[in-house]
Image: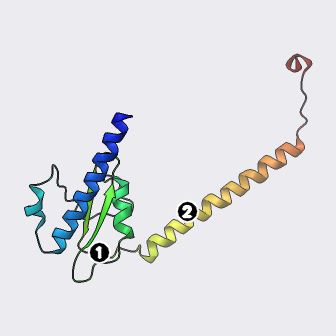
Amino acid sequence: MEAALKSEKASELAGKAADTTIVELKQGKSLVQLSNKYSEQANLGEIKRDDKKSDQRIVQAAFRLPRPAAKPEYDIVDQGNATAVLILEKVTEGTKPGKKEQREALEKQIESMISSQEFAAVLNYLKSQSDIVISDQLRQ
């Protein structure tokens, strides 16, 4: 019980520290100035929706934020054992596959669907033409 209370209090303090950090960042302080107060600072750089290297809670939070206009967007992310301040400075448009890549992917998908349907048809035909006999020894 005591450990749970300590954990809850630590989370509460971390949340307050994160709120304070965001206020200070919005007032113009740099992340370098503020990083001395806290144990860790990480720059994830450019992340994509399918990023598997970064904590998925941070990736999801980054993609929920609105696009930053003149100033960065901020969010607080609870990582379970830590609280992170997320700073979104810019959004880069993703690349879209070209027509050739789309066509090849679609062809593969259609081939897979047709072969699955053909296999199911052959299997159903074989089932309809088979006689299944269960021996008395297997019934016991």
Secondary structure found at label 1: loop
Residues 56 and 98: in front is 56
In the rendered image, the quadrant that contains the N terminus is: top left
The answer to which quarter of the image holds residue 16 is: bottom left
Q: Amino acid at mark 1?
A: Val
Q: Residue 111 location in percent, x, y?
A: 61, 61
Quick check: 86 left or right of 39? Answer: right
Q: Residue at x 88, y 45 (%)?
A: 128
Q: Residue at x 51, y 66 (%)?
A: 105
Q: Earlier in the sequence, mark 1 or mark 2?
A: 1
Instruction: Determine crowd level at label 2: few under 14, some 14-19, many 20+ residues with C-alpha closer than 10 A.
Output: few
Question: Which residue carries the number 2 mark?
Answer: 108
Residue 114 location (% of width, % of height): 67, 60
Closer to the eye: label 1 or 2 = 1
SS assignment at label 2: helix
Identify the residue at the far bottom of this view: 70
- x then y, percent, for residue 57: 37, 56
State the residue in front, 45 or 42: 42
Circle 1 is placed at which residue position?
A: 91
Q: Amino acid at mark 2?
A: Lys
* Quarter that holds the C terminus: top right
* Distance CA(mark 1)–CA(mark 2): 32 Å
Q: Is residue 127 above or below residue 65?
A: above
Q: Position of residue 102 (x, y in %)?
A: 48, 72
**Which residue corresponds to the image point at 17% horizontal and 51% vertical from the top-left?**
40
Compared with residue 12, is residue 46 higher up or lower down, i.e. above or below?
below
Q: Viewer-proximal residue, 21 or 108? A: 21
